[in-house]
Image (cartoon, rainbow, N blue to C red):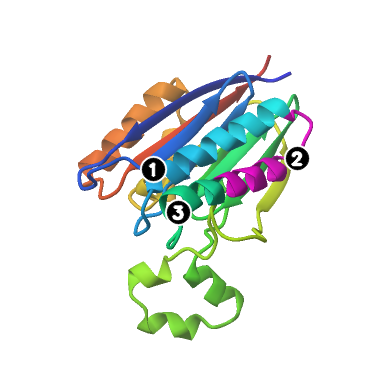
Amino acid sequence: MLRLRSASLTDIGKVRRRNEDRFLCDDTLRLYGVADGIGGLPGGAEAAQTTVDAVRAYVRDHPSAALADAVQAANHAVLSRAAEISPHVGIGSTLSVAHFSASQLSLAHVGDSRSYVWHAGRLERLTRDHSVANEAIDRGEEHTLRWMSEANRNALTRCIGQPPPLIVDNSVRPLQAGERFLFASDGVSRVVGEDHLARFLATDAPPADVLHELIDLVLRRGAPDNATAVLVAVDEA
């Protein structure tokens, strides 16, 4: 089995009054990811916390189940919580989460938090934002975006907490020693471009040191949103 080294870090940033990001960094379950409560809806922190708690509990209690099943369980849990605290509007969260087995990674994704892998000198984004802009591009309707504000272009089209059916992006990939996986909320990815992210992940520094430098850069650039990241390094056993 390949050995994992991990670290996680979250910061409220310099604008928000509350941190509505949550993360998973569970070395026992080998479960890692980030959830970001949706701004503009009530209960963002509650949605993100419910999401990570439900995913963790499902993976713990159903170790052989597909990760997508855990995400569906989280969606049900957030819907139930919404009925209690925001029945008329709802609550929601993003989720980008991975479960590492002995030789492969299972990834599940909803929303615009992101997952990346760095290996052999190259950074690859493993997820695609579920946004109005990307859906317009998929339909060949890019021309409609010119009249939209940036906020409307980036608005989410999928989230944890939406009525079913929830479509979850799933993928499985083999693990290789030397890979580094980064899971980040948009408070990181909208501030630090992929060229800079690649430089951070290329270093051999411990994951905790890398994340401190990364979040420090986000803060120096104004940190307009909560900033959360989880980093997993894959080593030879």
Up/down of 237 relative to 67, above or below: above
Secondary element type, mark 1: helix
Which residue type does callout 1 highlight?
Answer: Ala
Which residue is situated farthest in the right direction here?
A: 64
Dominant secondary-structure state across the stretch colored magenta? helix
Of 120 and 106, nearer the camera is: 106
Q: Between residues 36 and 118, which one lies in front from this camera angle?
A: 36
Q: Nearer the viewer, mark 1 or mark 2?
A: 1
Q: Which residue is mark 3?
A: 91
Is residue 2 located in the magenta-colored stretch of the structure?
A: no
Can you identify the residue that label 2 sits on? Answer: 66
In the image, taking residue 162 as reference, residue 156 lies left or right, namely left
Q: Position of residue 74 (x, y in %)?
A: 60, 43
Q: Say which mark, if any, is on residue 45.
A: 1
Q: Quadrant of the N terminus?
A: top right
Mark 1 and mark 2 in contact? Answer it, CB < 8 Å. no
